[in-house]
């Protein structure tokens, strides 16, 4: 919410581009074709949001560069910025096509708009520098969630100094928070960062993720069940579909009834997954290779029953 207000204040423009299936919090102007719980409960939009609040939100399919170019051509000088999850994790998980993020960086720069990475999910998870480090893309603004407080309630946004200088009291864009700089959350966040710096956490997570991906793909193949498995670092999602999943439209083609059977079968065998086809899965440093092997064995048995 604050990053978008800042983008609008900095550029003097009103319109924002977002992508269907990307969830950016429950601010009114962003509850348009959102992911996360809005998908799970079948309500992509929320009651109580006036149409006027969303009239400046342009919703496009993810991974479609032509649609982005067309939106800028149709709204010359009106688009303040693009906000996206660089690796969307609120409609399951799908990855940017090669060159896609680079194109967004190029297009926004060419049109004087800002590129905003919502790294609430990917920040400090895909790499110490988040998705922007992993893919080598520098956005104008970045948003982070409770991961920066070691799991305690906190959020942050930041970016280029000239943009941030538009915030009050230096600039005209208002932002405030009762718990800003809360000492407990900041201490927990520093401790988490120090632990990450002192360990080989990301290499371990990559190894665990690769092992899980290979094992689950093999289990699905052996069972003859069509599954498309997406993974990026420690984030993953398996869709019950034979087609690749690059955006929300692709994700919605997956067999959700089959997912329900799979979820309950795995739960009965001691493996607790997120109870929705549209939630990403996460590995953590608390997991071991033995946990991955147990999961793969359980999946092999459950998939044979589908």
Image (cartoon, grey):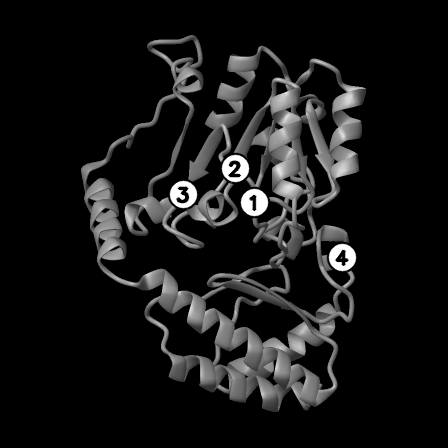
Numbered mark located on residue 145 in the image: 3
- Between marks 1 and 3 in the image, the one whose residue lies nearer the viewer: 1
Secondary structure of the residue carrying tag 3 is loop
Q: Between disc 3 and disc 2, whose residue precedes?
A: 2
Q: Between disc 4 and disc 2, whose residue precedes?
A: 2
Q: Residues within 10 Å of mark 2 (few under 14, many from 20)?
A: many
Which of the pair 127/121 is nearer the observer? Answer: 127
Secondary structure of the residue carrying tag 2 is strand
Q: Residue at x 36, y 77 (%)?
A: 288
- In the rendered view, would you say 234 is above or below 126? below
Q: Residues within 10 Å of mark 3 (few under 14, many from 20)?
A: many
Disc 1 designates what residue? Answer: 86
Q: Are marks 4 and 2 in contact (CB under 8 Å)?
A: no
Tell me the CA gap for discs 4 and 3.
27 Å
Disc 2 designates what residue? Answer: 117
Q: Residue at x 49, y 28 (%)?
A: 140
- In the rendered view, would you say 22 is above or below 258? above
Q: Are marks 1 and 2 in contact (CB under 8 Å)?
A: yes
Numbered mark located on residue 59 in the image: none
Residue 86 placed where, x, y %? 56, 44
- In the rendered view, would you say 21 is above or below 238? above
Disc 4 designates what residue? Answer: 250
Residue 116 placed where, x, y %? 53, 32
């Amino acid at each position: 919410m604050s990053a978008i207000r800042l983008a609008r204040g900095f550029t003097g423009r009103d319109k924002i581009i977002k992508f269907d299936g990307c969830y950016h919090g429950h601010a009114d102007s962003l509850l348009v074709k959102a992911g996360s719980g809005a998908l799970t409960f079948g309500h992509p939009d929320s009651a109580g949001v006036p149409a006027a609040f969303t009239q400046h939100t342009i919703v496009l399919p993810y991974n479609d560069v032509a649609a982005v170019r067309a939106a800028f051509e149709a709204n010359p000088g009106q688009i303040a910025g693009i906000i996206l999850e660089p690796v969307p994790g609120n409609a399951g998980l799908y990855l940017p096509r090669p060159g896609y993020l680079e194109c967004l960086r190029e297009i926004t720069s060419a049109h004087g708009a800002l590129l905003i990475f919502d790294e609430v999910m990917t920040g400090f998870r895909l790499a110490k520098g988040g998705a922007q480090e992993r893919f080598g893309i520098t956005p104008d603004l970045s948003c982070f969630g409770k991961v920066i407080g070691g799991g305690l309630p906190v959020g942050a946004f930041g970016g280029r100094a000239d943009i941030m200088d538009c915030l009050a009291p230096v600039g005209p864009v208002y932002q405030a928070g009762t718990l800003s700089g809360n000492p407990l959350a900041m201490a927990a966040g520093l401790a988490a960062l120090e632990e990450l710096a002192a360990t080989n956490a990301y290499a371990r997570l990559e190894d665990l993720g690769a092992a899980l991906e290979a094992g689950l793909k093999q289990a699905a193949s052996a069972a003859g069940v069509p599954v498309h498995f997406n993974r990026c670092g420690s984030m993953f999602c398996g869709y019950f579909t034979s087609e690749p999943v690059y955006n929300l439209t692709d994700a919605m083609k997956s067999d959700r009834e089959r997912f329900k059977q799979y979820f309950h079968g795995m739960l009965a065998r001691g493996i607790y997954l997120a109870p929705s086809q549209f939630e990403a899965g996460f590995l953590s440093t608390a997991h071991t290779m033995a946990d991955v092997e147990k999961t793969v064995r359980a999946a092999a048995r459950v998939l044979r029953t589908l």
